Image (spheres, helix red, strand yellow):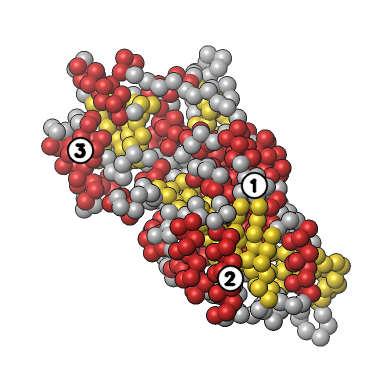
Amino acid sequence: MVSRDGGKATLPPTSWFVSVEGADGCCRYIGLHPSGVARTSAYEMSPSFHRKIVDRDQLVAQVDLARSGGRTVAQCHGCFDILHPGHIRYLEFARRQADFLVVTLTGDPNVNKGDQRPYIPQELRAESLAALEFVDAVCIDPNPTAEDVLEDVKPDIYIKGREYEQSPDPRFLREREVVERNGGRVIFSSGDVVFSSTQLIDAMGGNQQLDQQRCRVIADRHEITRETLAATVDCFKGLRVLVIGDTILDRYVFCDAINVASEAPVMSLSQLDEQSYVGGAAIVARHIAAMGGRAFLLTSVANDSRSAMVEHVLRRERVESHLLRCRPNLVEKVRYLVDDSKLLKVEDAQHVPLDSLAERRAATVLEQQADAADAVIFCDFGFGMITGGLLGMAMDALRQRVRTISADVSGPRANLLHFRNADLLCPTERELRANLNDYDRGLSYVAHTLLAQTQSKHLFVTVQKKGLVMFDRPTQDPTSPDWSGRLLSEHLPTFADRPLDCLGGGDALLAAATLSLAAGAGLMHAAYLGNAAAALELSELGNVPISSGALHRWISQRTELAARKQPATADAASV
C-alpha cells in the first residue's frame, strides 16, 4: 500500500478496520479501536482495487485464464463482517498455498449471525477484501452456502478455519465433497491470531460513521436518491387512507423535583405545566393528513371532555372521522417528567370491546369508505376498538377492494396474529416476540413464523435504538414454492441522532411507510421514509404530526442520497 505522497505506508495500529470510500473515490481505512472510537487513517488507496470485485461469470473467466497460464487456484469463503488480523493471516496463508487467490463472501440476505448482521454491507465487505494486495479476485455469493460457487471455481485448494476440521456440519461436508470431487483438496488454518467479528461488533457498539456508510451503500443498492424519495413524498398528496383503531390522549405533566417527601421515601415534585397530545390511532391519521394524504379515522370515543378535545384537533387538522360513542371515558395516559426524564406513567384505561351493534356499524362504515380508499391502517392498542368480530366482517372485503393494508399493535391485549393477508406489519421486536411467545430464537426465525401464520407479505421490525429490520419474501406469488422460503432482510440503522422522546416513532413509521406503498414505491423506499418519519417524531416532545415539508427538508440534508459515481468492475483481461 502506498500513501498519497508516494511513500511506503503501513496499516494504522488498530485492532481491526474497514475500508470506507470517500467522495474523491479513494479508500480510507477507519480503524475501529476496542474503545469503540473510529479513527480515520491518513493512508489512502487508489480506487483501482474495485476491479478485483467481479460477478460469477467474470470470476469463472478469470480463474480459467489463470489456469491456462499454469497457475493454481485457492479459494476462501466466509462472511468477513469486520476484517480483523485473524482474517488477514488466514488469507495470507491461503495466498501462499497457490498462485491465484479467490475470496467469495456470503451476501447480506444469507448472513445468519444475529439480528442486525451483517454489520458491514456486502459491498463494503467486498471492498475491504479487494483492497488487500494478496487477494486476486472477490465475488459476492448470493447463496446460503458455497456449494454452487465451488462447483464453478473448482479450486485446487479450499481453505477453511481449524474449527471445521472435525465439523459434522452438513453444509461444510457438502462443500468438501464438491471440492474433492473436482480434484481439489481442503486445508484447515485459522491464521493463528484468534478474533471474532461478532465479539468485536458487540464490544464496539454503534458507530455513527459506519452507520452513515451503511446507509450510503443501501441507498446505492436500492437506487434510493433525493429525487426518488422526494417524488414519493409528492405522491402522498390526495391518497385516501382509512385508519381504524383506539384513540388515546397522552398527557405530559412537567415537574420540578423538590426533595424526598418527609412522610415516606418518595420523590416530591412540583408541577410546572402540562400538555395533552391526541395519540393512538388518531396520531396516525394526523400524520397521514400532515404528509398530504386524505385521512379518515374510525375510532371509539366517549361523551367527555377528552373526546371533545379529540374532535377539535381532528377538525382543525382536517381529518375526517366517524366516532363511535361507546366508551365510558376516553383512554388517557399521564406521564410525569422532570427535565427530559420520564419518572412515572399512570393509565386511566379500560378494555371496552365493541358490542355486536357497534361492530356492525363499524363494518358498514368501512364498507362505505373502502372503494375510495388507497390504503387501510389498523392500529390495535388493545382497548377494544378492533375486535375479532369486526375483522371477521370487514377484512376479506377490504382485501378485495383496497390495494394496501398495514397494521401494528401495542399492549398486552392486542394480537398481531389477527391481521391476516396484510401487505405490511410494523411491530417492535418486543411486540413481535410477545405475540408469538418466542423470546429465545433469532429474529429472522420469529419473523418467518409471523409471516407464515398471518400469510402477510412484508414486515418491518423496529429494534429499539438500532433502527429497523426489513423482512421480505423471496417472491410475492403465493402459489410459488418460494413463497414460504427463507426471508430476505435488510437492517436500516436509526436516523435519530439525538432522540428527545421515544413516544410515537412507530406511529410515524407506520403512516409514512403505508403512504409510500400506496404511492407505488418499493419496499426499501417505504422503509427509508418510514425510518425518516420515525426519526423526526423522536426529535419532538409528545405526539406531533410529521409534515411532508419536514420530510422534504430531511431528504435534502441527507448526504448519502447525493448522486455518486459507480466504480468500474473487472473483466477477464485484467488478470
Tell me the distance, in whole angstroms, between the alpha carbons under discs 2 and 1: 24 Å
User: Which amino acid type is shown beneath numbered disc 1?
Assistant: Gly
Whether label 3 touches label 1, CB < 8 Å: no
Which residue is identified by label 2? 362
**Label 2 neighbourhood size at 10 Å, few (<14), some (14-19), many (20+)?**
many
Which residue is identified by label 1? 238
Tell me the distance, in whole angstroms, between the alpha carbons under discs 3 and 1: 62 Å
Left or right, 419 with respect to 88, comes to right
Tell me the distance, in whole angstroms, between the alpha carbons under discs 3 and 2: 66 Å
Front residue (pair 37, 313): 313
**Label 1 neighbourhood size at 10 Å, few (<14), some (14-19), many (20+)?**
some
Q: Which mark is residue 49?
A: none
Q: Residue at x 61, y 49 (%)?
A: 239
Residue 335 visible in the displayed image: no
Which residue is identified by label 3? 186
Q: Residue at x 53, y 60 (%)?
A: 407
Which of the 4 image quarters holds residue 358?
bottom right
Q: Earlier in the sequence, mark 2 or mark 1?
A: 1
Q: Residue at x 45, y 53 (%)?
A: 458
> Residue 152's spot in the image, x, y percent?
22, 31
